[in-house]
Amino acid sequence: MKLLSFLLSLYAICANMFRGVMAVNKNSTINLRVNTEVKEQAGLILDAMGLSFSDAFNLMLHQIRIQRSLPFEIVAYSNNPKSETLAFIERVENGEEELVGPFSTKDELWRSLGI
């Protein structure tokens, strides 16, 4: 839900920026150090959206101010399985849960899940 709120706010702010409605006195500079590969990939996405890094960062700062938090969820990456996954594996091994598959195609998987 936070992501949807962020995207809607982003759209509204972008629309206002490009209409000239949002006149912001930009008189402060922030220097950032970022991973080159991440910057290049993000730059391609921002270019496709018609935004500069400055535009994107300003939008994020506005959202932080409005929401009083980061406008997106922070997810920690881990090579270790989550506790839910480990619990599921244990239930399967104990015969408490049925494991279906293997599947030859992703469509077979989706059908088994009722999707």
Image (cartoon, rainbow, N blue to C red):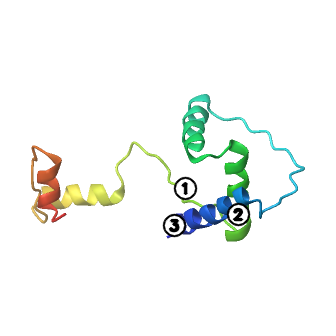
Nearer the observer: mark 2 or 1; the answer is: 2
Residue position marked by numbered label 2 in the rendering? 16
- Return the x and y of residue 39 as percentages of the image width and height: 61, 35
Q: Residue at x 9, y 51 (%)?
A: 101
- Return the x and y of residue 64 as percentages of the image width and height: 70, 63
Task: Pick whichever, 109 or 23, lies toward us.
Answer: 23
- Return the x and y of residue 97 as percentages of the image width and height: 13, 64
Q: Residues within 10 Å of mark 1 (few under 14, many from 20)?
A: few
Q: Does 108 sit above or below residue 37?
A: below
Earlier residue among tags 3 and 1: 3
Q: Residue at x 57, y 35 (%)?
A: 38
Residue 74: which numbered mark, if any?
1
Pointer 2 with pointer 1, Cβ within 8 A: no
Is label 2 in a helix, a strand or a loop? helix
Q: Residue at x 70, y 63 (%)?
A: 16
**Mark 2 is on which residue type?**
Asn
Residue position marked by numbered label 3 in the rendering? 4
Task: Pick whichever, 49 or 74, lies toward us.
Answer: 49
Q: Does 93 sit above or below residue 43?
A: below
Earlier residue among tags 2 and 1: 2
Earlier residue among tags 3 and 2: 3
- Measure how far apart labels 2 and 1 are at the Cα level: 28 Å
Pointer 3 with pointer 1, Cβ within 8 A: no
Is label 1 in a helix, a strand or a loop? loop
Decide if residue 29 is on the left or right side of residue 112.
right
Task: Pick whichever, 27 or 104, lies toward us.
Answer: 27
- Return the x and y of residue 113 as percentages of the image width and height: 16, 62
- Measure how far apart labels 3 and 1 are at the Cα level: 15 Å
Nearer the observer: mark 3 or 2; the answer is: 2
**Mark 1 is on which residue type?**
Ile
Pointer 3 with pointer 2, Cβ within 8 A: no
